[in-house]
Amino acid sequence: MIVAQGKSIAEVAKLIEDANKVLVVGCGGCVTVCLAGGEKEVGVLASALRMLRQKENKPLETVEVTLSRQCDPEYMDMLEKYITDDIDCVVSMACGVGVQFIAERFDKWVVPALNTKFAGGAMEHGVWGERCGLCGECVLHKTGGICPIIRCSKSILNGPCGGSQDGKCEINQDVECAWQLIYDRMKKLGQLDKLMEIEPAKDWSKSRDGGPRKVVREDVMIP
């Protein structure tokens, strides 16, 4: 999932300082799972913004709604009845995709209430870790399901670099050496011989270096 983290109340308040009425839009997808932008967080942010404005003697009116997803036009249709002429600004509590989808769809000023961090998952309650670099060319079948692109600090495809100590990365003792993890995993699975294969230079044109990417599934497209 996409992991995001909320901006501070003061930062969001600054982004909407000229608005009198705002629509706060949550997302029921990834940001709900990571407790950053679901229905509960929408209510908390809207309430905090109103209280801050009251202290400044500049009342703020808020309208709150949470879509199932902000990254799908099907759900974006639901926003039409909420985006009325008197709405000065839309505050999106989705990842950057949701912010851009609202901005592309409606002629309203849209601001992000979250900072989109990475593609990852829950490691324990309240802790999320990065697991995927979205590189466009997955090699996890060669490394025992441990990504050397995102989990190795140097993104080495033919590791290890030789700098790790006691299984920890030389750049940070809190970071596990990805290639130690890969070695241990492959050994456990009886697949160490696969690590002797030299991985060629990665084709980064399939990653962000190739510009904005698109996935097309003609089999599910509507003619």
Image (cartoon, helix red, strand yellow):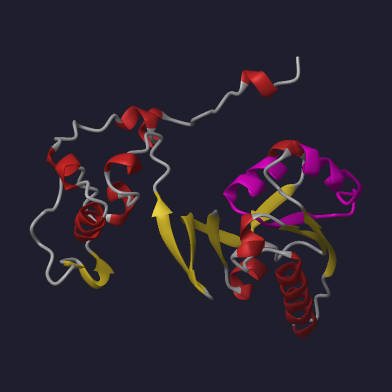
Residue furthest to the bottom in view is: 55
> Residue 79: image x %, image y %?
84, 47
Asked if 102 appears above or below 161 in the picture, the reply is above
Residue at image position (21%, 59%) is: 184
User: Is 177 inside the magenta-drawn segment?
Assistant: no
- In this orientation, which residue lies closer to the viewer: 190 or 161? 190
- In this orientation, which residue lies closer to the viewer: 215 or 143? 143
Residue 65 appears in which quarter of the rendering? bottom right
Residue at image position (38%, 39%) is: 135
- In this orientation, which residue lies closer to the viewer: 206 or 210? 206
Residue at image position (21%, 43%) is: 157
From the image, which quarter does the C terminus lie in?
A: top right
Q: Residue 49: in sight, yes or no? A: yes
> Residue 112: image x %, image y %?
63, 57
Residue furthest to the top in view is: 223
* Left/right of residue 139 with respect to residue 67 in the rendered view: left
Residue 217 appears in which quarter of the rendering? top right
Residue 115 appears in which quarter of the rendering? bottom right
Tally the marks.
0
Q: Magenta residues, as a range? A: 74-103
